[in-house]
């Protein structure tokens, strides 16, 4: 069966510090991978998605970036965090377009 | 106009009643539609998927899709206090790889 791992569960970072969140999927090949962010009391905002290695689509240009160095690995990064980057970050995967999307457990990021 | 719109609620129903959650979308060529449930502090979990017009039933849940009117709904029969959560509607616009979520509707089921 397929599983998705996302870590850490919580993270507190100072403004201006770098960020690296990692997500890996097991049990499937060439998944579509996604990063979403949910601000407090808000809906899910799509940040990036990838349909293959090295293929990244950015939905909300900002000081975040994403990379997919391996088939089942998706990384969200920032060189300098802003206060507005605080939120609940969710990695998700599916086998292809139109298919069901499954989420990781999420990372609660607080930028202070 | 937002791509996917939901009434934020809260929607309050008594235990045992039918809860009706609605969602409208803007892209006429959207192909896939999903309902997720999210408890506070947790990640969303998939409840239903629907791809063609009409009703789709799974236990106490029924998803309804009307592509001509561009709306999708979720009915929860015999609502339980454990159904209290935020329900998210998700739509895939066109033949793209992205999945867009609505803001979510908070459901409160009162004992």
Image (spheres, coloured by chain):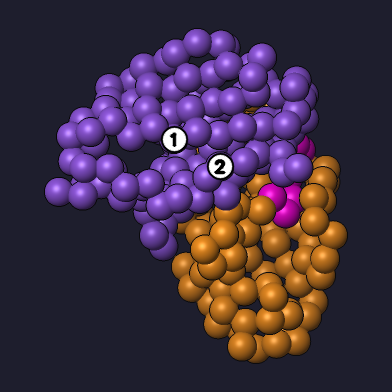
Chain colours: A orange, B purple
**Dot 1 alpha-carbon crowd within 10 angstroms: few under 14, some 14 to 19, many 20 or more:** many
Q: Is residue B51 left or right of residue B81?
A: right
Q: Residues within 10 Å of mark 2 (few under 14, many from 20)?
A: many
Which is nearer the eye, B15 or B88? B15
- Residue B77 in the image: x percent, y percent? 26, 28
The quarter of the image holding the N terminus of chain A is top left
Picture residue at 62% right of the left edge, 59% below the top: A37
Residue A88 in view here: no
Dominant SS of magenta comes to strand
Q: Could you tell me residue B68's position as x and y percent?
A: 66, 14
Question: Relative to B28, does residue A30 appear above or below in the rendering?
Answer: below
Residue at 33% from the left image edge and 34% from the top image edge: B19
- Direction from residue B24 to residue B109 in the image, left or right: left
Would you say residue A3 sits in the magenta stretch? no
State which region is magenta.
Answer: A46-52
The x and y percentages for residue B42 are: 41, 57
Reading the image, the residue beneath label 1 is B21
Looking at the image, do the residues carrying marks 1 and 2 touch, with CB atoms under 8 Å apart?
yes
Badge number at residue B6: 2
């Amino acid at each position: 069966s397929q599983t998705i791992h996302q870590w850490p569960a919580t993270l507190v970072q100072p403004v201006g510090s770098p960020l690296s969140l990692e997500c890996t999927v097991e049990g499937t090949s060439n998944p579509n991978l996604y990063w979403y962010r949910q601000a407090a009391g808000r809906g899910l905002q799509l940040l990036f998605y990838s349909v293959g290695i090295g293929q990244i689509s950015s939905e909300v240009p900002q000081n975040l970036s994403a990379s997919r160095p391996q088939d089942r690995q998706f990384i969200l990064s920032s060189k300098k965090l802003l206060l507005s980057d605080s939120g609940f970050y969710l990695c998700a995967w599916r086998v292809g377009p139109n298919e069901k999307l499954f989420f990781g457990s999420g990372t609660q990021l607080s930028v202070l | 106009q937002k791509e996917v719109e939901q009434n934020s609620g809260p929607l309050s129903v008594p235990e045992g009643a039918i809860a009706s959650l609605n969602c409208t979308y803007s892209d006429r060529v959207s192909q896939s539609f999903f309902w997720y449930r999210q408890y506070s502090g947790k990640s969303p979990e998939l409840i239903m998927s629907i791809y063609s017009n009409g009703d789709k039933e799974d236990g106490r849940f029924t998803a309804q899709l009307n592509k001509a009117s561009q709306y999708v709904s979720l009915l929860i029969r015999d609502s339980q206090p454990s159904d209290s959560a935020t329900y998210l509607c998700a739509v895939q616009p066109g033949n793209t790889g992205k999945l867009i979520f609505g803001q979510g509707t908070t459901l409160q089921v009162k004992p």
